[in-house]
Image (spheres, rainbow, N blue to C red):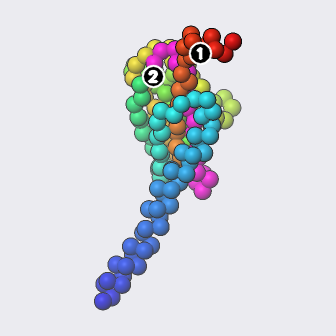
Amino acid sequence: MKVRLLLLIAVLLWLPTRYAAAQCNDQLIGVSAELLDDFTYIKDIKVRMKKSKKGKLPYSHKYSVILNKGMKYRFISANAQEFDGQLVFKIYNTQNVMIMTNYSQSTGKVYDVVDYTCKASGQYYVEVSFLDGKEGCAVCVLGFKRKKTEYELYLDN
C-alpha cells in the first residue's frame, strides 16, 4: 500500500514538469507566427536545453533545411519568459561556413527576427543554442516570401 502511494506521489510530482516543458514550446509558435507577417510558414524548431556546464561550450543542436536561390527567408526566435536563456541561431552552408546569425557579437544583441535572401540553392544547417549556455526554452520559426508572378505584378499596378 505504501509503495503504491509513493509511486502515485512521484508520478504526480513528475507530470507537471513534463507538461510545463512541452507547453513552453507550443505556446511560443503562436507568438512567432504573428511575426511572420506576409511570409509563409515552413517549419519550426523547438528547443529546450539545460544550463551548460561551467567552463564548457554551450549545448547546441543542428537541424537541416533546404533553401532556394533568390528566395527571401525569415527566421524568428521566441524565448520562454520563465527561463533566462536567449536563443541564438546560426545558419551554415554545406562547407560549414556560417552565413548568418541572429547574434551580434560586437553589440551583444540577440535579434528576434532576421531576414535572409538565399544566394545559392541547397541544404543549409541551423545551429541553435542559448546565449552564454543558460537554460532555456524557445522556438525558431522559418518562413519564406514567395515571389510574385508576372500576372500578380500586373494586377498590383
Q: Amino acid at mark 2?
A: Leu
- Reading the image, the residue beneath label 2 is 67
State the extent of the magenta-drawn residues as a range: 67-86
Q: Is residue 115 above or below residue 150?
A: below
Name the residue nearer the viewer: 52 or 70. 70
Q: Looking at the image, which residue is at 46% across and 40% down?
A: 45
Q: Is residue 156 above or below residue 2?
A: above
Residue 130 x, y percent position in the rendering: 53, 43
> Which quarter shows the C terminus?
top right
Q: Residues within 10 Å of mark 1 (few under 14, many from 20)?
A: few
Q: Is residue 106 above or below residue 16?
A: above
- Reading the image, the residue beneath label 1 is 152
Q: Is residue 97 left or right of residue 80?
A: left
Q: Looking at the image, which residue is at 36% across and 82% down?
A: 6
Residue 115 x, y percent position in the rendering: 60, 26
Res. 45 in view: yes
Q: Looking at the image, which residue is at 50% across and 61% down?
A: 20
Name the residue nearer the viewer: 145 or 6. 145
Q: Secondary structure at mark 1?
A: helix
